[in-house]
Every structure is written in structure tokens, then in C-alpha cells.
Amino acid sequence: MRTEKTLPSQILEEKTLFRNRWTELVELTYRDEKNQIRHWEGVHRSSRSSAVVIVPRLVPSGSFVLIRQFRPPTGKYLLEFPAGLIDEGESPAETAVRELKEETGYFGKIESVTPPLYTSPGLLSESCFMAFVSIDEEIPQNRFPEAENEPGECIEVIVLKADKILPYLDDAAEKGDGIDIKLYTYFKTNQF
């Protein structure tokens, strides 16, 4: 049996095709494993920042905190976990705590954070961390949480027991809402 020696793929050149405030469309020239020169188009965030997705669970009830907001690229309201971009100098854990408070009003404690993950690597360069957060329902700050949404954000907070989430998502999809893949996959693959 003959084995060919392969080289690792490598980006050779990146050319900006279009750039605006939030996104950058680029053409990538790369060498593949068989030493062939190839081209690919991709999208970066203009800031090249990563994101964090927060999986917030209330303690002791075990309910989860979800959000619903309008996402212009989809033309729909989407059901999602809270999430946000990591500011310069901030860790994914710090972003998770900040974004959870801004989007839902809840104060949480980081339990764990994943390594960087990718949601659509055939198009996007953005990496995304998942932060698993516990929210103590019994502390005064979490009894009547008040979100601190940024201008342009209108976020509805939804709190549900785990066994109610998939039926809720299916019903919302039938009514025309979109569902973020990370949210759906989390509840579809976990047994509660």
C-alpha cells in the first residue's frame, strides 16, 4: 500500500473584498494537503473578536434561562442562549458574567468554559466559547432581575424547566420563530 506524503494546509494570502462596521468579506488563498493552490471566500467580524454563549441554569430549581430577540440577518425572532462578543482584554468567563447581567438581569457564577468552538466554519472565522453558569435563585439580586439591554436590543427573557424546552422550541418554530442551533442541540442531546 502506497502512502502519499501530505503537507498541512496553510493560508498563503488574505484579500479583503468588502469591509463595513461589523463584517469583513475576504478571499483566502491557501495551499491544500496535496500542494494545490486553492481559493475560498469567508467572513470575519471586523473586530476579529470571539463570542461567548452562556448556558445559564437556575439553582436550586434547575430551570434554564433563554432569550428571544429579533435577528435582522434571519428576518425572524430567534430563541437562543444569552450571548455576546468578548471585549478586548476580557476573558470568556468575564464576558459571560457581564452579558448574562446585561441581557437577562441575572447574576451568575461560572462553572466551566469550553475551548473555542466554531459554529459555521465553512463561512465564518468567529470562534465561540460556551460558558456554563449557575444562578443562585435565593440571593436578592436574582429574585427580580432587571436586564440592562444595549440600545437596539429588545430581549425577552424566558425561564423554563429542561423538560419543557424542546416542546416550547417546537411550538415556537411552528409559529415562525427561529431557533439557534446551539440551543436546540444542547437540549436535544442532553437527557434531563
Image (tube, helix red, strand yellow):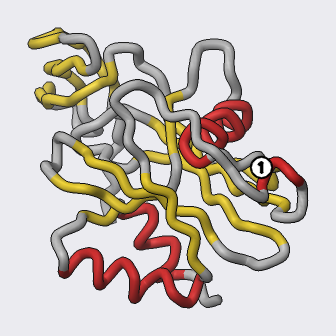
> For numbered disc 1, what is the local secondary structure?
loop
Residue in the image at 31% along x and 83% along y: 170
Q: Position of residue 145 (x, y in %)?
A: 68, 50
Residue at image point 34% right, 40% down: 6
Q: Disc 1 residue type?
A: Gly
Q: Position of residue 29 (x, y in %)?
A: 18, 20
Q: Report the residue marked by disc 1.
A: 108
Near mark 1 (Cα within 10 A), the count class, few <14, some 14-19 or many ≥20, is many
Among all residues in the image, which is located at the extreme right? 139
Looking at the image, can residue 189 be seen? yes
Please state if 34 lies on the left or on the right of 142 as rendered: left
User: Where does residue 189 sit, x and y in percent of width and height?
Assistant: 51, 81
Residue toward you, 10 or 108: 108
Q: Nearer the viewer, residue 56 or 154?
A: 154
The image shows residue 150, relative to residue 117, as above or below, that is: above
The quarter holding residue 45 reads top left
Q: Quadrant of the C terminus?
A: bottom right
Drawn side of residue 87 relative to residue 136, left or right? left
